[in-house]
Amino acid sequence: MLEIRNLKASVDGNPILQGIDLSVQAGEVHAIMGPNGSGKSTLAQVLAGHQAYEVDGASRVSFLGDDLLELPAEERARAGLFLAFQYPVEIAGITNASFLQAALNETRKSRGLEELDSFDFREVLEEKMKLVEMKADFADRFVNYGFSGGEKKRNEILQLAVLEPRLAILDETDSGLDIDALRIVANGVNKLRSPNRSFIVVTHYQRLLDYIVPDYVHILYKGRIVKSGTKDLALELEEKGYDWIREETAAAL
Amino acid sequence: MDGLIRDDDLFATPSKRPPGVYLFVITTAEYDQMPQRDGLETAKYEGSRVERSNREAEALANREYKHGWTSDIESETIPKGLNEDIIRLISEKKGEPAWMLEWRLKAYQRFLTMPGEPTWAKVRYESPDLQDISYYSAPKKKAKLKSMDEVDPDLVATFEKLGINIEEQKRLANVAVDAVFDSVSVATTHKDILAKRGIIFCSFSEALREHPELVRKYIGSVVPQGDNYYAALNSAVFSDGSFVYIPKGVKCPMDLSTYFRINAADTGQFERTLIVADEGAEVSYLEGCTAPMRDENQLHAAVVEIVAHKNATVRYSTVQNWYAGDKDGKGGIYNFVTKRGKCQGDHSRISWTQVETGSAITWKYPSCILQGDYSVGEFYSVALTNNLQQADTGTKMLHLGRNTSSTVISKTISAGRSDSSYRGLIRVNPKAENSRSYTQCDSLLIGSECGAHTFPYIDVRNSSSSVEHEASTSKISEDQLFYCQSRGIGQEDAISMVVNGFCKEVFDHLPMEFAVEATKLLSLSLEGSVG
Ligand SMILES: Nc1ncnc2c1ncn2[C@@H]1O[C@H](COP(=O)(O)OP(=O)(O)OP(=O)(O)O)[C@@H](O)[C@H]1O
Ligand SMILES: [Mg+2]
């Protein structure tokens, strides 16, 4: 599904991603952990197509057979890539419902499907809102506008549920959620797991991985994946912190 | 009091379309007006402040100025030039009463004494040569038509381009043709509905013939002849316009609309609109404008006057889409318009809503004189400039009566290399005790080569009143665009989405079908705004 080869990216000449290799097969859940500032969000944003990052010419990313780096952000989304933002953005004056309807219809159009009118879309939306246990009035509030931190995160998962991507990248969706919300969001994600949908879950906490059990765990450090393993790696991190990773990495260099 | 309200003085001294029924009249430099809907449909559009998706704009396929065509309708145009003889000729062609001619000539005399164009607005352009304009152009008169087959095929084609369907055309063309060729019998079908309630809605010329006493009583009572340079010019040479009178206690059962179109070359458009709402009356009036694409600039200098008596309410909505010139600033309309309403009676209300996307240069300040106690003035505005457009627009709220209140919401969007200014005056006179005014004035910049400016003038002369002014300027945020894009929404659509969200408070005040049109227009006008 996703093949990343030697991905390097920088901002204003400062290298941030220093050669990432990762492959994600259909149906897999990969967790990415790593200390603050190690490049997790940058990786997510680069994959989603943010223009602020200069991507090295030798980097290769293929997604469902497409050369991902060639596509503008909107086409990556239409091709089935979804990013749940660490910091979701507010858009005043546009309701959640009309925003999502526009988004879904763009994707449908690109797949040769008929666009949904407001009535049909409402039905889809209401059903998905139940999935993330969101109150109905959020449909008619402006996109993330005045939402609490946790509500914004939940709204990202609602969007994920509506857009039904092939690959979803969740960037610290768990941070800012209270215990109940964490369970609800995790349940929502688990219901969306399927043999042809993959997830990359960026998190700092083992707790989320108790709910969303990953197939693989990777540790990103200074712009590189320095260690990969199974869910046990997350438990080890929880116990030992990052110091041993720092030491190991320093020794290897 | 006269001195208080001139557009010239004040700033100089700093201190769309319902499906089914759509009537328009295409004339050349003339135009006419008709009601757009019958009573049944009104209900449907009431409470139109419903949630609207800004995606109602269908495919943004045709992103260019789509009204840029011209119609080959045979017309009669008088020689270019401006002098007393021309004014006499216009008045004679229109068969006006003697007092109207006298009034025009008096305005012309005032005009001649004026130093020239106002210079305080933040716009730069080459002054139009007023001697190089023809001040009157009308379709050739023909006998009244009896059936659709007799309608000038070019006129039918014109309707088609404006998106009016055949069935409507059949119904309308007669009406419209009547209007164009024989303005005595404008809009007969709708006239019945209106006449039953004593509502007068007709061309200015017709009003002069049928209701001279009303016209005489109100013309110039809100915008005096010598108000400003272009108002004086308009008063001297105005071609035609609409006249609305709503009698005491009558709520107009449908929105009244005028569609303005400049067609002939080298002509100016100088229309005059007069709306009078008698005690307790209510009306909502819509105005739309388009013009062909021409390389030369054309002058549009209109005057709109509104009078609201005790307990009356008038809502005036405009979607202004005059041709804006091309990417390099060639051509486009000079839109120098004086619009003013007088809340004459207690508890009266006048509300202006405008969406300004067209014109090369816009100079326009729809204003309210809040004379009656407890009267209310409102101004909701979206002004968008792109490429090399320039707009200097805003409002004036003059609080004269006690307990008056005003609300101003202005949204300015600048893209390309354009320049847009909000200029607003709030004046609260000593006697206007306990008055309140609230202004919110937001600017949004797209790209780095455009400008947005705010010129508030606040003058409060008593201590029991409160005036609030809030202003903000922001750039369209990269984060917002990326967020939209990451959900599959293309960049231009993302921009128009963010912009539409920015304008929502104003669009909510537009009648439904106008709001849909405005949404589409914004998308079209933003075309090419991202590098
Ligand atoms: N647009 C940018 N401009 C400048 N520096 C940036 C930009 N984006 C990221 N960086 C820098 O790159 C490094 C990696 O940032 P990133 O946000 O990817 O970290 P992260 O692993 O997601 O951290 P956290 O766990 O705190 O979310 C940081 O040092 C950050 O300051
Ligand atoms: Mg991060």
Image: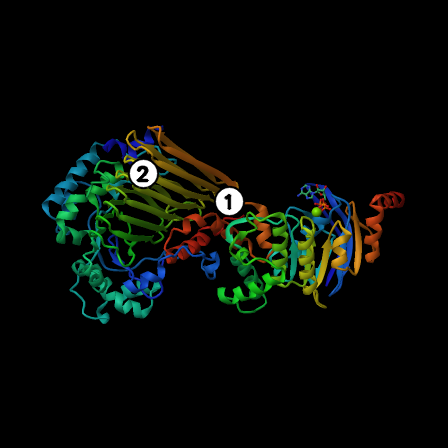
Question: Where residue B428 sits: x, y (%)?
Answer: 32, 32
B460 versus B371 height, above or below: above
Question: Where residue B251 sits: x, y (%)?
Answer: 26, 55
Q: Which mark is residue B176?
A: none
Q: Label 1 vs label 2: CA separation?
A: 37 Å
Q: Relative to residue B264, is residue B449 drawn left or right?
A: right
> Do tag 1 and tag 2 residues touch (Cβ < 8 Å)?
no
Q: Nearer the viewer, mark 1 or mark 2?
A: 2
Q: Which mark is residue B404?
A: 2
Q: Is residue A64 visible?
A: no
Question: Where residue A26 sits: x, y (%)?
Answer: 73, 65
The part of the image, by quadrant, that contains residue B43 is bottom left
**Image mark 2: chain:** B
What SS does tag 1 mark? Answer: loop
Residue lying farthest left? B98
Q: Along the line of sight, which residue is nearer the eye, A240 or B495? A: A240
Question: Where residue B312 sits: x, y (%)?
Answer: 26, 48
Q: Where is mark 1, residue-wise?
A: B446
**Is the shortest distance between ligand 1 and the CB of mark 1 under 8 Å?**
no
Q: Residues within 10 Å of mark 1 (few under 14, many from 20)?
A: many
Q: Amino acid at mark 1?
A: Ile
Q: Is residue A14 visible?
A: yes
Q: Residue at x 33, y 28 (%)?
A: B462
Count the marks. Answer: 2
Q: Residue at x 61, y 50 (%)?
A: A88
What SS does tag 2 mark? Answer: loop
